[in-house]
Image: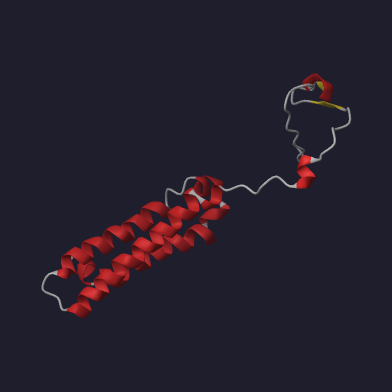
Amino acid sequence: MKFLLRHSYWLAPAIAFVGFISYFTVFVWFPPLRDVPWVNVPMVLLGVLLGVVGLLGGWKGSGWRRRSLYLGGALASVLIAGLLCLYIYSISYQMPPISSVTENLEKAPEFSLSDADGKMVSLSDYRGKKVIISFYRGFW
């Protein structure tokens, strides 16, 4: 425990930084881990907790240089955690505005396709309703 408190000024931002960088380099490629970052947010929050505990524990009986190290480590881990949470919960949800191409789309031509059950379904069956048509490439 003394090791963690003594070295929290560099260990806390390092843990937070690993949690931050691993989200963009590893976990963003896996949708369950990208959409709900249950690995990265706890890791970054662990860095913040370690920084705050180290700051509180190292503040007593230390000189101003040592205090500035603990304060810098705690602030760096809080900043990293804030940036990750800002990206995950705010910036990544912003959608681009509707372009002029999207606003001026033409109506789709009439066609019929088989659905998953093999029944023929035509586009006119959904007239007056909003429809999303998705085409997948592959074999199944």
Relative to 38, is 115 above or below?
Answer: above
Q: Quadrant of residue 19?
A: bottom left
| Picture layout, residue 94 above or below residue 26 | above
Tell whether 118 sits left or right of 27.
Answer: right
Number of labels in the image equals 0
| Picture layout, residue 119 above or below residue 82 | above
The quadrant the N terminus occupies is bottom left
Residue 47 placed where, x, y %?
Answer: 33, 61
In this view, the residue in front, 112 or 92, is 92
Q: What residue is shown at x 89% (from left), y 31% (from top)?
A: 109
Q: Quadrant of the C terminus?
A: top right
Most extreme residue toward the left, as rendered?
A: 61
Residue 117 relative to residue 68: left or right: right
**Quarter of the image where one finds residue 66:** bottom left
Which residue shows up at 88% across the image and 27% down it?
110
The x, y position of residue 117, in whole percent, is 75, 22
Model colouring: secondary structure
* Residue 138 shows in the view: no
Identify the residue shown where x is 49% and y is 57%. 23
- Front-most of residues 44 and 81: 81
- How far from the left and from the top, in percent, is residue 124? 83, 22
Q: Is residue 1 left or right of residue 12?
A: left
Tell me if I can see residue 55 in this picture: yes
The correct choice, above or below, for 118 with respect to 67 in the image is: above
Q: Position of residue 31 (x, y in %)?
A: 56, 47
